[in-house]
Each structure stands twice: as C-alpha cells, then as structure tokens.
Image: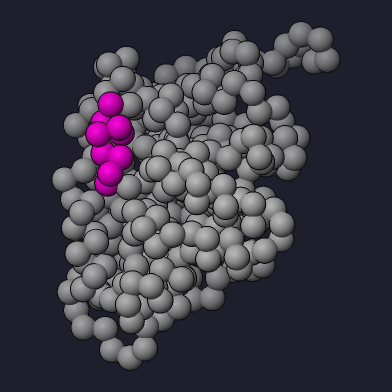
Amino acid sequence: MRVGLHLGYWAAGPPEGAAHAVELADEAGLDSVWTAEAYGSDAFTPLAWWGSLTSRVRLGTGIAQLSARTPTATAMAALTLDHLSGGRVVLGLGASGPQVVEGWYGRPYPRPLERTREYVDIVRQVLRREGPVRAQGRHYRLPLDGEGTTGEGKALRATVHPRRPDLPIHLAAQGPRNVALAAEIADGWLPAFFSPRLDGWAREQLARGFANRSPDLSPVQRFEVNASLPVAVGTDVESAADRVRPHLALYIGGMGSERSNFHREAVERLGYEAACAEVRRRWVAGDREGAARAVPTELVLDVALAGRPEQLRDQLATWRGTVVTGVLLQLPPAAVPAVVDALAGRAVDGPAPAG
C-alpha cells in the first residue's frame, strides 16, 4: 500500500515548514504529495512551487475544483506541470458543494455527475490531442455559439504536445453514484472520511462503475484508491484523538449546509448519525470546542490514525487488504518527520508533535 502526504489547503497563510515536509517526503520514498483548494489558496500553485524541490514523488491535486476553471484551463495547467515535473502529475478533480460552487464561483451546482462526466471528457480530449476539442453537452459547449456570442469561435487543439496523453485523472467522490462514476471514467478514486469497515460497500460501488468502463481507459487492475487519512501522534489514543477532533468537527458541522453536506453523509454512512447531529447542533450554535468534544473517539479511529507510534502502525495495518491502494497522510508539516519515522518503525525521540 502506497503512502503519500496530503498538505490540503491553507488557513490564514502558507503552512510553516511545508517546503521541508515535501522535501522529506521525496527523500523518504513516499509515493506522492497532494494539495487542495477551497476558497482561498489554489491547488496548482503550491504544488508547482513545492514540487520544484522534488525529483521523484508524484504531484497530485486533491482536489482541484471543477468550477474553479474551465475544463480546458484545467487541462492546460495539468499538462504544463506534467512537463515541468518530468511526468509526475496526478490530476485530482472534484465537484465540491453548492455553497462553494454557487457562493464563491458563481456557477450553478445541479447535475454534478453529468457536469463531471462532460468535464473529464474535455480534459481527456485536450490531453490526447487527437483533434480539435469539441463538446456539445448541457454544461460545456466548444466551440461556444448561439445567442450572446460572436459566432467566430473555432475548435482548437492544444499547441503543446502533452508529455502523457494518459495523464491520470482521479475523482473525489463520497456517495455511491459518484464512486461508481469514478470507476467508470477516471483512473482513480479519492475518498475522504473512509474506513476499512466500508470496504465491501466500496467494492460494490466500484464494480458498478467498472462494468461500464471504456476499454480506451487504463485497465481496472491499475485503478487507484488513495484515501485521505488524518494522523496524530500522542502519548496515548485519547490525547492524539483530541488533535483530530476539531478537523472532523469542522467537516461534519461547518462544511456544506443543513441540506447538503457530503462529508457528514460519509460519516453517517459509518453509523454515526446521532453524533453528527450533536456536532452539527453545537457548531451551528457557535460552540466550536463543544462540537469537537462531541466527536467520538471511535469515529476518530475509524477514519484516522491516532496514538503512540506503535499504535499508528497497528491501526494502519487494518487498511491493508482493503480496496485502498494508498493512504494520503493529513497532518501539520512539523509532524511529518515523526509520523514518517513512526510508520517506518523507527524510534521517535522527544515530545510528540502537534498533529
């Protein structure tokens, strides 16, 4: 099972020590480094900046939001960085949610699966460069014509020859139809808030998508499942879990709306409906600390690694043999050396880092 580093998106500013953490990931033999975006820092710029310090790790967007860029703009960014990095890019895409899509990007959210299908098709057309890019979907039309246009649009082919026409595309997905779509049209799935307990459920959804997969895509045997996995080292499970609870509380209680929160739905799928309702209630009331305290330790251990170094290794072992082919460790950059050593079975000296 591969191990990667997920740096996420920024809070108030660039995370201290991120560049060193990325260099360490490259030197330590980790498989990949990933960045994300919400409505602040973007995914591509940090990946290119920090990625320039590396020579081996794969560089992934986890995720680049569909509504942030047109499909052709996303394809341009991916193929450009793939050339500059020597063919190491993994393009992770996701639909995000209605609050961000309609509130930040000013784009309509409905029909996200249909929109994703059209988007990926256009990106693949750009990367394969077999001819001018054309699309006549509900959401994307190339060339654009009709009312409000000049009528002078021309179907174009990328001037740059992509380094890899089969540059891998991974989709972030939570619900069953989204997971099946990833298996049908993408090269990988990026789950969040996943648990080994969901292995059977995940295999069922993926099988549905694989049944409709085009033979033009990479073989099913090469399909990747890279799960984001929060990690915290502590003197015991509870103290380490306390470092993960605020992260889970944010996504359960503060992301999305009352009607639409795909992260909360993923956690509820594990059987934590009551806990999610309590976290949400406290978060909406402005009690952030109370919302974090309402996250059960059992939930933390379902979707994260928390504890002493040897406990982290034992917890990670439960992921082996599942549908997951790789885990993307989510932790502060300062904690990366200790966690890498812990998972490798090396001694961790000094106090446990915040993580």
Q: Position of residue 260 (x, y in %)?
A: 61, 35
Residue 4 spot, x, y in % from top left:
33, 57
Q: Which residues are magenta?
A: 196-204
In this view of the protein, can residue 128 be seen by the observer?
A: no
206 left or right of 13? left
In the image, residue 343 above or below residue 138: below
- SS assignment for the magenta stretch, majority: helix
The residue shown at (49%, 64%) is 245
At 30% across and 32% down in the image, what residue appears?
Answer: 201
Q: Residue 6: percent from the left, percent from the top?
A: 42, 58
Front residue (pair 202, 171): 202
Q: Residue furthest right?
A: 148
Q: Is residue 260 magenta?
A: no
* Residue 231, image quadrant: bottom left
Q: Front-most of 69 and 48?
A: 69
Q: Which residue is depicted at the point 32% across and 15% down?
A: 212
Q: Is residue 89 above or below residue 329?
A: above
Quadrant containing the C terminus is bottom left
Query: Quadrant of residue 225 in the image?
Result: top left
Residue 59 as seen in the image, left or right of residue 223: right
